[in-house]
Amino acid sequence: MLRLGRAAAPLRALLGPLSLLPRRPASGGRSKEVLLRVHAEENRGIAEILMNRPRAKNSLGKVFVEELFETLDALHFDDSVRVVIIRSNVAGVFCAGADLKERASMTDVETDLFVQKLRSLMDGIAALPMPTIAAIEGYALGGGLELALACDLRVAASSAKMGLIETTRGLFPGAGGTQRLPRCIGISLAKELIFTGRQIDGQEALSMGLVNHSVPQNDEGDAAYQRALTLAKEIVPRAPIAVRMGKVAINKGIEVDIASGMAIERMCYAQNIPTKDRQEGMAAFIEKREPKFIGK
């Protein structure tokens, strides 16, 4: 049986209005490299993961990866969060990809193990039960684009630069890029981008279907975030269990033949039938009013 996961105490109740959640104290006064912001009031139900490693352009170093794992753990079983936005807290960059300075000091075995950890990290993002939106401002290169590809939806500033550039560094995408990019834009285009290591802007990404929306950058440098926030606000009022089951049905069904996909859809639909939200939706329709979904 497909399950939504166990309940957890809502983070919002612990944090109050818009706040940052530190999962552990930073050692030696070091700033947290990944922050979690949970909205309240009019934006209740939205959480943000903020990448905060300015000196290394949010590159995927050991500490950064560990903190991102911890943040995913904090979110996974929180039913109060209905949408997660992943964004940068560093101007001009989403995520620059691998920390090559760190990588250079690793042995071949250590490199293999660390890249496998990156694959697990991207799988963890994809496995979050609620919808995820990547808000891409600036550069999303290599592992940074792989991180965005692990999200359900992507919004980019038209000036953003994206690419799986690993072949320009003697590498190839190893954190899911060879699998998620062709599933997103098709095999031929994915091969072209990976073989050439080419960087594309937000408008090109939109034309390929790599991002859902491309928006002109604003003076504050957060146009993609603002569009992502608008999109999140559109999702939040919808029945959260139905949304989550829709995500499972799509993600699991796309990997199998259509007959098996239909069986997965039925299993997901069956989980939604006994919910109070389904009853509320029908009642609201009959009574000609907006439904109020509670996630039960």
Image (cartoon, rainbow, N blue to C red):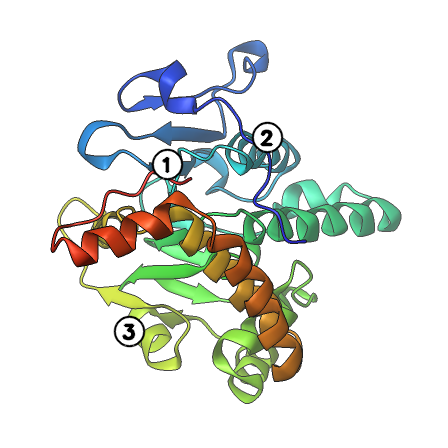
Q: Earlier in the sequence, mark 2 or mark 1?
A: 1
Q: Residue at (50%, 34%) from the top-left corner?
A: 75
Q: Secondary structure at mark 2?
A: helix
Image coords of residue 170 (percent x, y) = 70, 67
**Residue occupied by mark 1:** 47
**Residue occupied by mark 3:** 203
Disc 2 marks which amino acid?
A: Glu
Q: Residue at (44%, 71%) from the top-left corner?
A: 199
Judging depth in this view, the residue of 154 and 113 nearest the camera is 154
Disc 3 marks which amino acid?
A: Gln
Image coords of residue 208 (percent x, y) = 39, 80
Q: Residue at (55%, 68%) from the top-left corner?
A: 265
**Left or right placement of residue 247 versus residue 117 in this view:** left
Tell me how far mark 3 sits from mark 2, CA to CA.
33 Å
Q: Earlier in the sequence, mark 3 or mark 2?
A: 2
Residues at badges 1 and 3 in contact (C-beta under 8 Å)? no
Image coords of residue 21 (percent x, y) = 43, 21
**Residue occupied by mark 2:** 70
Q: Secondary structure at mark 3?
A: helix
